[in-house]
Image (spheres, rainbow, N blue to C red):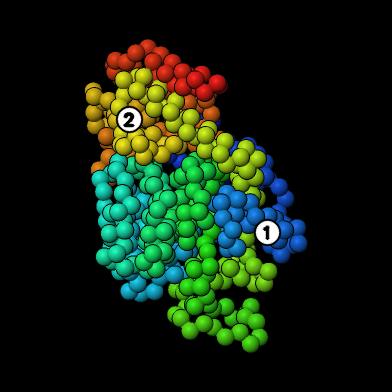
Amino acid sequence: MTANKIFEELNPPPRLMMGPGPVNVDPRVLNAMSMPLLGQFDPAFTEYMDEVMVLYRQIFQTENRWTFLIDGTARAAIETFMVSTIEPGDKVLVPVFGRFGHLLTEIAERCAADVEIIEVEWGEVFEPQQIEDAVKRVRPKIVAMCQGDTSTTVAQPLAEIGEICARYDALSYVDATASLVGMDLPVDNWKIDCVSVSLQKCLAGPPGIAPITFNDRVAEIVNRRKHIEKGIRPDGFEAAGGPMVSSNYFDLGMLMDYWSEARLNHHTEATSMLYAARECARVVLKEGLQPCFNRHALASKAMVAGLEGLGLTVFGDKSHKMPNVTGVYIPDGIDGDEGEMVRSEMLHDFGIEIGTSFGPLHGKIWRIGAMGYNCQKHNILTCLAALEATLRQHKVKMPAGGGVDAALAEYRAAGQ
């Protein structure tokens, strides 16, 4: 018989998470998560559900009725959209400029879509004409892409993409997990049909729930496959003629009923995560969307200036750099596993986490984030100082204090 094992209570070491996400959760969000649980159909709780919809319409800058939460991480919302809109053989176009374009491709393929990708080198983005040419050639049902891809630290301009898709009767889907509220994403003005995100980046919350918004074009496609499971099916209901969505949990039509006035039971809502999502949105809106964008943009300028002040080289097309994540080339003299040693020593000696890299960039760059609650001047200066000290331990020559001085100059120039 195996002996019982009883562990100590949780006591995580303090960390400053300056990687590509997740990041440190805003204390106000942690406090909200500690609030007492309520039943999922308690009038107080359904009022919180309605408030979440109102808050996230403002976050997404949309009037979409269908703006709510999917229980699960960011890819849960991606899969919910795709499994509910894609039927076998439907054409999906994915412009890939990093790892997460490949994720969109895989999820679409698992939904039995006929997927075509177009690609640029990691660190670059697409011109609108490239996307329009591909849409015109492929004639997809859906164009799925990211706004920001943390694997490459660049952001794809989207202002023209929704209009291009509408012109050719394609749905536009955007995964904005890495970028929402770190940069502008006016969903309605840019005519984007569906956007989904998660909390653990610029929204400064924990992973585990995924806000989504979609318009009536998407709802119409979903409702063609509308099905209600036995046991909660209203008398007289007749299912739509389209094929039933293959996932019960990610059936967008049933989730719409759950979040609508009908309140048809689907799952038991993740109460504490809904509290977190509500507080994440409330905190951002209290600051203001534009001030939030500005805070991330200034942090980006300071981080770039600081890294260059240390003699390091920033990765990618800086004109399309994400404000909240910066890629930086691992300096000469730091070879092989030594790059991981630098990251490990920053964690061990300073309690600071920075990110490694994927795919063709593995071993070539580090990814340093400054987003959400961590997007503050003192965190950026602390991270730069720790990086300099760690690199000096590895005999990398650089101007003493050059990183902090250069970053501080950007903040001073902005009156901070």
Q: Residue at x 27, y 40 (%)?
A: 361
Residue reaching furthest bottom?
236
Percent x, y for residue 51?
Answer: 68, 55
* Left or right of 178 in this view: 391: left
Disc ID at residue 314: 2
Q: Residue at x 62, y 37 (%)?
A: 287
Q: Give me the C-alpha separation between circle 2 and circle 1.
A: 43 Å
* Identity of the residue drawn at 65% across and 45% down: 282
* Residue 269, image x, y percentages: 62, 60
| Type of the residue with mark 1 | Asp
Badge 2 marks a residue whose secondary structure is loop
Question: Which of pointers 2 and 1 lies earlier in the amino acid sequence?
Answer: 1
Q: Give the residue type that dot 2 points to.
A: Val
Indicate which disc residue 50 carries.
1
Q: Is there any visible trace of residue 73 in the rendered image?
A: no
Horizontal relation, residue 170 to residue 31: left or right: left
- Quadrant for residue 88, please give it: bottom left
Residue 179 in the image: above or below residue 384: below
